[in-house]
Structure formats: structure tokens, C-alpha cells
Amino acid sequence: MNSQLSTIIAREYLERVKRKSFIISTILMPLFMVGLMVLPALIAIFQTPEEKVIAVIDESGVVAKTLQNGDETKFVVVDKPLADILGNEGYYGVLSIGANIVEKPSNATLYTHSASSMSLENYISNQIKETVESIRLRKYNIDNLPEILAAVQADVNLQTFRIDESEEASETSSTLSYFIGIIMSFMLYMFILIYGQMVMTSIIEEKNNRVLEIVVSSVKPTYLMLGKILGIGAVAVTQILIWLIIVLSFSYWVMPSLMSGVVAGANDPELMAALGRLSDGSYVLSLFVYLLLFLVGGYLFYSSIYAAIGSAVDNIQDASQLTTIAVLPIILGMVLSPSVVADPMSSYATWISIIPFTSPLVMMARIPFGIPFWEIALSIVLLYLTIGFMIWLAAKIYRVGIFMYGKKPNITELIRWARYK
């Protein structure tokens, strides 16, 4: 490697790795991710539910007596007009049930003094639904109907096995693949935006300080731009590798104990398949290898665009408009990822995971589902081939833009700069 280029890479890398912000974010981010998963459970365990007293006015005379109190809900039957009860602040709300509720199940209204909740509405609706269905079934005069319904009721836990090319079936978890795909896609989105903008901000600062004018007297502009991109990119790779060590340690030592202890008596195939996947170190390692490949590819692709924009403007405000246009594809990839993981094998998902502008995020969202390797390889090859063109194009804009001051260029001017020999 050219000594000038290696010197720039080392400077950009060491300058950022030694910062306290890098060390803190590297350590805290995994803890933050674990906290996002654990915190809702802890809140649910330790929170004290507030009891909601619901006054019930039942004109049908058949529903109120079947309503069951819950942990957070208590029903009180009242024999007063609705107008007299609505102003009573002692009740959380008033449930009015019409006389023809059996014939018209929608004839039920809940009035609340404050904002209602979806869980409360579903809780009440389900109880009314069960009562109405029970009354309708009794009209058929079938003996032992409750026992018959209980006997035919079945809860299906579908086990999913994928048959690979060796015709061996392996148990999978679509739910786990869905969440891993979304998380991986979001991680790439954050890394590409954060570190790409870091390249642009650094170039703008050095341009305003007139440092670039001094540096380019001894270093080629292309080396300067490439060194900054690679140096900052190495910081992102370092952070991912540290997280890989943490995750692999968790996978090898924590997950097996969790499987043998906490869920030893669990009868949930989906849960067992998910935990089995997470305890497979080779599977976790393969995900991180793909994550690194697409992180490096996506970062190089978009950071070259950020570098070109940073060299063409004098401040962050002027860069905002050009940046918005430049990052639209990556935002589109993030927006499309949820629909892709809903049907990862569709032709629509395949095409947008191969196009370089959206492939890093979309392909990373599909990989946990075990898509054919040739699709991943094709996506990587096209991405890295396009990177060469993007860096070449950005370098042509960069060598002109770093000497331009006082005017924000438009797209047409950037194209003209790129055509300069």
C-alpha cells in the first residue's frame, strides 16, 4: 500500500478509536440492545397495575353476568340511566350494552373519562364475543355442547423444517429470522449513515480550516479522500468485531445454560428452534461475516458519495440538500426491509436485494431466512464492482471541490466537475 495512503488511514483510524465516545458506544450499545429486549419484561413484572372500574349498563340482561374481572379491570353492574353515570368520576368508564346485542354484536359502546387502551378494548370485546357466540350456539339445542366444543378445540404449534440441497431437514424459526433480519438491516442503516456522515463532516471541517490546501501539496487528492474513507471505515469494522466477540461469547456460554435450565420443560417448538439457532456459534459467526461484507460494501458505496458532497460545500447546512438526495436509496432500503422479510423469497425481494443502491440493507434482511448462496454472491459482486465506479467518480469531484469556496454547487455542476480531465 502507498505509504502516504497508509499514513492517512492510520491517522484517521487512531484519532477516532482513542476517543472516549468510541469506547463508551462500543461497550454501551450491546448493553442498550439487551436492555431494549429485557426492559419491557422487567416493567411488566414489577409494575403495579392500576385497577380500572367499568360501570356496566346491560339492557339485554345476558352479557353483564358473564363478564369476568381481570387483573386490571373490574366490572360493576349499575341500574341507572346512561346520562346519570357518565358524569361519575368514580368510574374509569361506562360500558353500555344494547338490548339486541345477540342479533347485533356491534351494539356495545365504551365511554371513558381518559384515553382508552387497545388491550382494554380487546379484553371487553372478546368477552362480549364469547357470550354472544355461546348464546347463539345454545339455540341449536345440542346436548353437551360445551363438552363437545372443548373436545374438538385444538392448539396447533407448527414446526418448520427446511430441506437443504443434501435433503436433510433442519428445524427453523421464521419469527427469529424475521427479527434477526430487521435488526441486522437496522444496524447497517445506522452504521452507514453515522460513519458516512463522519467522512463528510471531517472533510468540511478541514476544508474550512484550509488544512486541505496544505495537505494536497504533498498528497494526491485521491489518496487523501481514500485514506479518510478507509480509516473511518476501519473504525466501524473494529466496532463490529468487538460486538462479534461479545455475541459469540454469549452464544457459546450463556445460551446452552439457558436452554438446559430455563426452558427445560418448555413445550414450545418455535422457542426451542429459536434458542437452538442462537446457541449455534457457526450460525452466529456466518451472520457477522455477511454483516461485515455488506457493512464494508455499503459504507464504501455511500461514504464516497458523502466525501464528494463534503468536498463540494463549505458547511453542513449547504450539504443537507445534497445529502438528502444521496441517502434516499438507503432510506428506501430500510423502509422496504419489513416487507421483504415478510416474503423473503419473492422476485420483488430478490431484485431489490441485488441492486447496489439498496442491496446492503435488503440482502442482510433476507440472509437469516437461508436464501440461495448464489443470490448473496451476486449481490456482493455487483455491490463491490459498483463501489469502484463510485470511488472513481467521487475522486474526480473531490479533486475539484476541495478548492471551491463560497458557492453551493447543484447536481449539474457536480456532473461537470466529474467530467473534468
Image (cartoon, helix red, strand yellow):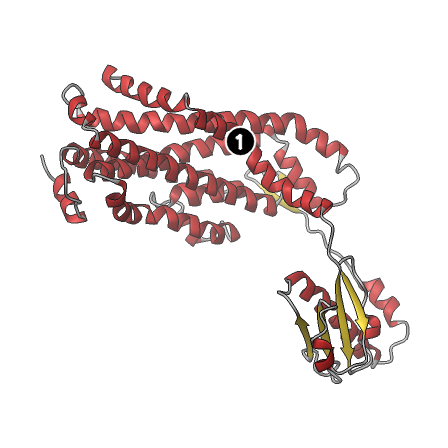
Label 1 neighbour load within 10 Å: few <14, some 14-19, many 20+:
few
Percent across and percent down for residue 183 are 51, 42
Percent across and percent down for residue 197 are 33, 37
Quarter of the N terminus within the rendering: top left
Residue kind at label 1, given as amino acid type: Leu
* Residue appearing at x 18%, y 22% in the figure: 215
Quarter of the C terminus within the rendering: top left
**Viewer-closest of 11 and 134:** 11
Question: In this rendering, is residue 344 above or below 207?
Answer: below
Question: In this rendering, is residue 362 above or below 22?
Answer: below
Is residue 100 rendered to the left or right of residue 243? Answer: right
Residue 170, can we see it? Answer: no
**Viewer-closest of 257 and 404:** 404
* Residue appearing at x 17%, y 35% in the figure: 396
* Residue appearing at x 30%, y 29% in the figure: 229
| Residue beneath disc 1 | 28
Residue 307, can we see it? Answer: yes
Percent across and percent down for residue 241 are 48, 26
**Viewer-closest of 131 and 376:** 131
Judging from the image, what secondary structure is the residue with disc 1 in? helix
Percent across and percent down for residue 2 are 24, 17
